[in-house]
Amino acid sequence: MPRIKLITFDLDDTFWDIKSVIMNAEKNSRKWIGSRINHAIDWGTFEDFMSIRRELIKHDPRLRYDLGLLRKQTIHHHLKNHISNKNELTQLVEEAYKFFLRERHKVTFFDEVLETLEALSKNYALGVLTNGNADIHKLGIGHLFDFSLSSVDVQNNKPDPAHFKAAKQISGIDFSETLHVGDDPVCDIQGAKNLGINTMWFNSKGLAWELDESPPLEFNHWSQFTNLLSLHHD
């Protein structure tokens, strides 16, 4: 296998568990909003929440890849019948989003993620390719990476090639000398392999590989990553 010069990483569910992060951010931001207004808000069920998001995306395709704007519009949807003053509504939506975003960055890294990144940064160019809106600089790991690309940056979501092509353009490193690491079989692994990029699948949940193509290199704990990299790409 070729010598790797650039390693790109997904973030959510690759460096930390995203479900618990979002659930806590959602719960705490709803409490915060409730403390700011004098009306009880019917947030509905999870399916109601997802249905609202689908309707918003249907009317504005940008929301498919701009999670920040989608979050703001979702908050606006819930508050618009409770706040009649347009300026007050806009201000509260912005403040609520900022609160949510702060909560969204309260992550717990998987064991040995930080140690692994520290070691890798000494020998490889490192990049982030995420469909989410986490900011590596707010997480205290920005100094370990050469670049970070979100879906807003490239105006599309993985597995579309946009993230990967932008990484190649920024780094000047060919796909054959790039390794992409992520948890999603389609968005991360298939999306990268379609372009001839080397891949490693972070499979912390021990899932079976269900795609028709041959399974990628796989690891389920970050303590395994460096040895696997050395074995197959040095």
Image: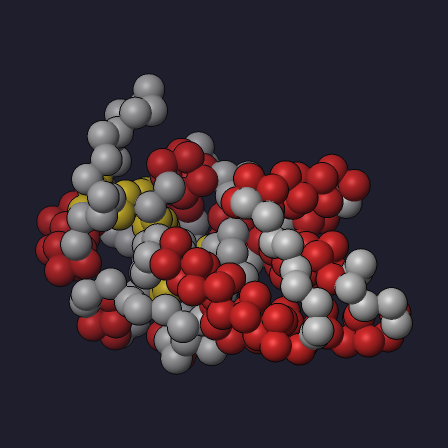
158, 179: nearer the viewer: 158
Please, is residue 229 above or below residue 211 in the view?
Answer: below
4, 14: nearer the viewer: 14
Confirm whether residue 169 shows in the render. no
Please, is residue 167 above or below residue 31 in the view?
Answer: above
| Residue 150 spot, x, y in % from top left | 55, 58
Apparent side of residue 28 relative to residue 85 in the rendered image (left or right):
left
Apparent side of residue 213 relative to residue 142 in the rendered image (left or right):
left
Q: As drawn, which residue projects farthest toward the top?
A: 212
Apparent side of residue 170 relative to residue 33 in the rendered image (left or right):
left
| Residue 87 spot, x, y in % from top left | 86, 75
| Residue 155 spot, x, y in % from top left | 66, 50
* Residue plotted at (55% across, 39% down): 47
Query: How is the rendered protein coloured?
Result: secondary structure
181, 82: nearer the viewer: 82
| Residue 57 spot, x, y in % from top left | 70, 42
* Residue plotted at (49% across, 48% down): 164
104, 79: nearer the viewer: 79
Confirm whether residue 221 shows in the render. yes
Q: Quadrant of residue 206?
A: top left
* Residue plotted at (37% across, 76% down): 141
* Residue plotted at (68% across, 49% down): 63
- Numbered-mark total: 0
Where the N terminus falls, by quadrant? top left
